[in-house]
Amino acid sequence: MGACHDWCGQKNAAQAGFLDRLRPASCFAESHAFQTWNEGSLVMPIYHSAAARARKERQAAEDAVRARLMKQRLDQRIGDLKAKHASAPVRSMNGENRRWPRTSAYKVATAVLDTGAEVTCRIVDVSFGGMRIEFLDESVRPGEFGLTVPTLRFVGIVQNAWTRGAQTGVEVVRWRESA
């Protein structure tokens, strides 16, 4: 067994008893009673007492308990998310699941409000039961109004079904065949 510095050997019984009570955090040989810290040419011993060892063991035990609790919480949260996902309504992967298919229109229309005011809007798409229109002014939110689309030869009464930003989905309440 080779010594890495002068303090490795035990000189007398008093020193041997003192060194036996100290334990290294890491050592090169079993006879080392302390770890060294090397900074340039200065070699300093780092002593580890029984209190320090007990504190480290206690911290390691607390860390293990904390890790086990975190894993349990994570497993619980994943289980909750899976249950929520399983109970969610199923969406169709093959496009939109609608009563009537939509067709793009991009036509200009005129909305006649209850007050008699006429507002220009744009038809985004059309289906048999309704259409998606986009008002130029987002503040216009009529509930039920008259709609005229000359290029589609549509004149009728529509009702607001949903609103998202400037776009509004309307369903046809009553229409006339010719404009």
Image: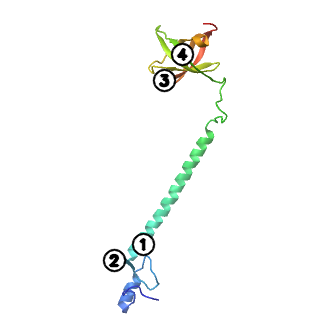
* Residue where numbered disc 2 is placed: 40
- In the foreground, 171 or 103: 103
State the residue lying farthest toward the bottom: 12
Question: Which residue is drawn at the image coordinates 65% and 29% (left, top)?
Answer: 97
Q: Residues within 10 Å of mark 2 (few under 14, many from 20)?
A: few
- In the foreground, 100 or 26: 100
Q: Is residue 18 left or right of residue 150?
A: left
**Location of residue 127 by image quarter:** top right
Q: Residues within 10 Å of mark 3 (few under 14, many from 20)?
A: some
Quick one: label 2 or label 3, which is nearer the N terminus? 2
* Residue where numbered disc 3 is placed: 166
* Residue where numbered disc 1 is placed: 54
- Three-letter amino acid code at the position of disc 2: Gly
* Residue where numbered disc 4 is placed: 108
| Label 4 secondary element | strand
Where is the C terminus found, in terms of image quarters? Answer: top right
Question: Which residue is drawn at the image coordinates 40% and 76% (left, top)?
Answer: 50
